Amino acid sequence: MIVADWICVVWQALGRATLVDWISGVGTTLTLASLWLYIWSERAASPRLAIEIGDRAGPTQYPHGKVLWVHVQVRNLPASRWERIPLFILRRPRRAATAVTARIWYQEVATKRHIIRKLSARWAGQVEPYDYIARQINPLLIPLGYTRDIPPTGQPEPIPIAIKYEGMDDCWAFTQESYLTAPDPQGRLWLAGHLRIPRGDYTVQVEVIYSGDTVVDNFRLSCRGQGLSTEDFDLSRGFHGS
C-alpha cells in the first residue's frame, strides 16, 4: 500500500505540473547529466601511471667488464573500455603525464636499515650526460635525466634500479650521479661509493610523482653472488618490507 500511495502522489503531482515545470525539470536533469559526464570524462582523461618490473638490460661487455642492469618501468595506462565512453562523447583525449619524477629507497631486508634514501631516479630514455668519445661529462644534460613526459600509449619508460659487474659481490644503484664518478683502479665506471649496495637482499620502494598524484610500489632486489644470472642478481615483485 505504501508503494501504491507513493505512485499515486507522484502521478497527481505530474498531472498538476505546468509546461514551465516540465521545461524546468528537463533543464535540471540535463544540467546534472552534463555535470556528471564532465566529471566522468575528467577522471578518464587524467593520466594513470603504473610501476612494473622492467627488462634485464645485458649483460653487456665493456672494455672495463661485463655489466647487467635491472629496471622497473612506468607506463601511462591507456583508457579502459568504460573510460573511453565519456572521452568519445566529449571528443577528449587522455592526457600525458608531464614532468614525471621518481625517487627510490633501498632497505636491507635483514636489518630493516635504509642504505639509500630518496635517490632521484634516472629515466633510461633520456640522453646520457656522458660523451664516451670525448670521455667527459656534459653538465647541462644532468638535470634532464630526472624528469620525463609519458604519453598515454602504454609504452614502458624504464628506470634503472641497480647495476652489477661480473666478478663482483656487490651491486650499485644507478642514477645521473653515477656518470660523475671517476673510474675505479680497474677502469670500471659508474661505481659511486655512496650508491654501493652490499651483497644481500633489499626492499626497493619506488615512488613516482606526476600531475598532482603519486604512485608507490615495492620490489625485491637480490645481490647474492659474483655472477650475472637471476640467482646472483635479480629484481622481483611481490615483496613488501616494513
Image (cartoon, rainbow, N blue to C red):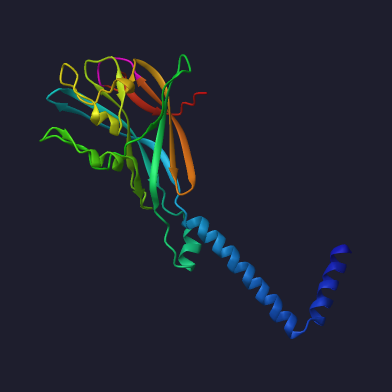
Asked which quadrant contains residue 93, the reply is bottom left
Q: Is residue 75 above or below residue 220?
A: below
Dominant secondary-structure state across the stretch colored magenta: loop
**Rendered residue at 87%/68% (across/down):** 5
Residue 83 in the figure: left or right of residue 17: left
Q: Which of these two is toward me, 69 or 147?
A: 147
- Give the x, y percent position of residue 111: 47, 14
Q: Give the residues drawn in magenta, as a range.
A: 223-228
- Give the x, y percent position of residue 191: 25, 23
**Is 151 included in the stretch rendered in magenta?**
no
Asked which quadrant contains residue 128, the reply is top left
Asked which quadrant contains residue 66, the reply is top left
Residue 71 in the figure: left or right of residue 64: right
- Give the x, y percent position of residue 82: 50, 57
Q: Which of these two is toward me, 205 or 102?
A: 102
Residue furthest to the front in view is 139
Q: Is residue 210 above or below residue 1?
A: above
Residue furthest to the bottom in view is 19
Number of callouts? 0
**Is 224 included in the stretch rendered in magenta?**
yes
Quarter of the image with the N terminus in it = bottom right
- Give the x, y percent position of residue 12: 84, 77
Q: Is residue 236 above or below residue 28?
A: above
**Rendered residue at 24%/15% (across/down):** 168
Residue furthest to the left in view is 133
**Rendered residue at 79%/81% (across/down):** 17
Residue 67 in the figure: left or right of residue 43: left
